[in-house]
Image: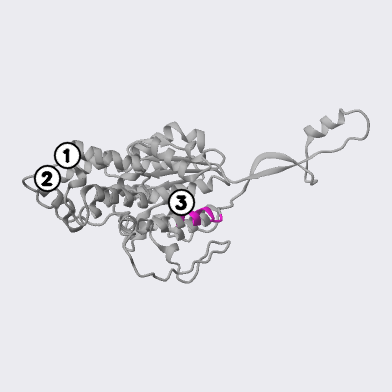
């Protein structure tokens, strides 16, 4: 293989320059890459060589992608960057006697806008006016409400960072309820016999009565989050919400794709990015397939008695698209509902106006949940906070979806 620095320009630059620019775009899109990774990629391409698009993709993917959650960003960046002006096809044609035929274009997927924004960030563009966004204590925004209503999958890298900050500044739900335990108090509400008797044993003086009052504590939250390929973009930002929620109450977080993973301890890290990085290491099935029924059944068998005490509220975060075993899924969710105080199902598919409960998995889950809400933008997360606070749920009754699609 010839020296990369002596290669003729392809698409406005040499092969090495194009790989460097591609790595810079990945870093702008959110994939952590350093100069060492770029040098390794150049050496790998020179040593391995390639005769088709798949070999070149596998070589760069092995060097640049270190976490499961970065695979989606890499795929989108690879499709956009190396497809522009037939860059990769020209490169293969120069290095092999025959170039493979081009493949038909694929539809846009989640995260494409963020990657495209990072790829073409260096292009000079005319400055556009940025709408002003004003927040108050109730998480309300200005009249335009652009960022609040924008879909997570269509956000750019800068908008996702702004969304993370807004989630951090949200007013978390306050749903404190009286429990059976008591605590000492100065108010003369209820006499504490045990402490009063202990005081009577002290030498000298009259008996001073002690008082106690019932404790109030927010019920714990148990989140079951789908990390399959169609849900990963939404799950990542929802985990930021759960991390912020964990500062005010006890939150147990479980991730499931093809298996169930408990990431509660990883979510206790003070930095949310560090918490998500640990979750990505633990969940080896990130952005893979999904088996909702098996995951919920395993949770009922192994974890329900440990985390569903004290009137816990369960948040089921999934699209409900279960291919096999819809009957088993219904029985698993029914058992989950009987062991918890409330089950709130949040589904990104509700962002579509024409959504109907026709899938078998959706129809199996709906009869056993107390609330059915969308979860695709900041406004839906704010509504979820109101639902968790014990307020009246403004959404449609879950069973009404079954009647509408009958």
From the image, state whether disc 3 or disc 2 is nearer to you. Answer: 2
Q: Residues within 10 Å of mark 3 (few under 14, many from 20)?
A: some
Q: To which residue does mark 3 refer? A: 370
Question: Which label is found at residue 118?
Answer: none
**Distance of label 1 from label 3 (alpha carbons):** 56 Å
Query: Under tag 3, what secondary structure?
Result: loop
Say if the magenta span includes residue 51: no
Q: Is 262 left, or right, of 181 in this rendering?
A: left
Say if the magenta span includes residue 166: yes
* Span of residues in magenta: 163-171
Q: Residue 72: percent from the left, percent from the top?
A: 30, 47
Q: To which residue does mark 2 refer? A: 95
Q: Residue furthest left?
A: 97
**Distance of label 2 from label 1 (alpha carbons):** 9 Å
Q: Earlier in the sequence, mark 3 or mark 2?
A: 2
From the image, state whether disc 1 or disc 3 is nearer to you. Answer: 1
Magenta region's main secondary structure?
helix
Q: Residues within 10 Å of mark 2 (few under 14, many from 20)?
A: some
**Distance of label 3 from label 2 (alpha carbons):** 61 Å
Query: Under tag 2, what secondary structure?
Result: helix
Q: To which residue does mark 1 refer? A: 49
Residue in the image at 23% along x and 37% along y:
44
Q: What is the quadrant of the N terminus in the image?
A: top left
């Amino acid at each position: 293989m010839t020296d990369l620095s002596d290669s003729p320009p392809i698409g406005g630059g040499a092969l090495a320059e194009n790989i460097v620019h591609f790595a810079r775009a990945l870093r702008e899109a959110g994939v952590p890459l350093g100069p060492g990774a770029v040098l390794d990629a150049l050496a790998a391409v020179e040593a391995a060589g390639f005769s088709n698009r798949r070999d070149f993709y596998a070589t760069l993917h092995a060097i640049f992608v270190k976490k499961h959650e970065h695979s989606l960003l890499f795929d989108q960046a690879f499709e956009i960057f190396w497809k522009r002006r037939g860059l990769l096809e020209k490169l293969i044609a120069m290095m092999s006697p025959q170039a493979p035929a081009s493949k038909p274009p694929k539809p846009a997927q989640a995260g494409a806008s963020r990657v495209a924004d990072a790829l073409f960030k260096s292009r000079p563009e005319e400055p556009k006016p940025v709408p002003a966004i004003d927040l108050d204590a109730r998480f309300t925004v200005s009249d335009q409400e652009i960022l609040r209503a924008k879909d997570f999958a269509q956000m750019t890298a800068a908008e996702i960072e702004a969304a993370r900050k807004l989630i951090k500044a949200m007013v978390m739900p306050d749903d404190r309820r009286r429990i059976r335990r008591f605590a000492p108090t100065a108010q003369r509400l209820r006499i504490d016999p045990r402490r009063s008797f202990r005081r009577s044993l002290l030498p000298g003086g009259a008996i001073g009565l002690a008082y106690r009052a019932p404790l109030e504590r927010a019920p714990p939250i148990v989140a079951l989050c789908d990390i399959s390929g169609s849900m990963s973009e939404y799950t990542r930002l929802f985990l930021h919400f759960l991390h912020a929620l964990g500062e005010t109450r006890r939150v147990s977080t479980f991730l499931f794709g093809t298996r169930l993973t408990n990431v509660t301890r990883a979510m206790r890290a003070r930095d949310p990015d560090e918490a998500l990085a640990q979750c990505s290491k633990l969940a080896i099935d990130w952005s893979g397939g999904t088996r909702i029924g098996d995951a919920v059944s395993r949770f009922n068998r192994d974890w329900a008695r440990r985390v569903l005490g004290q009137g816990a509220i369960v948040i089921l975060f999934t699209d409900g698209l279960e291919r096999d075993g819809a009957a088993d899924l219904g029985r698993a969710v029914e058992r989950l509902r009987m062991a918890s105080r409330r089950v709130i199902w949040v589904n990104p598919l509700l962002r579509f106006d024409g959504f109907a409960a026709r899938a078998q998995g959706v129809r199996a889950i709906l009869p056993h949940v107390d609330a059915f809400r969308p979860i695709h933008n900041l406004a839906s997360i704010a509504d979820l906070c109101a639902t968790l606070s014990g307020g009246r749920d403004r959404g449609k009754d879950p069973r009404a979806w079954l009647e509408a699609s009958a």
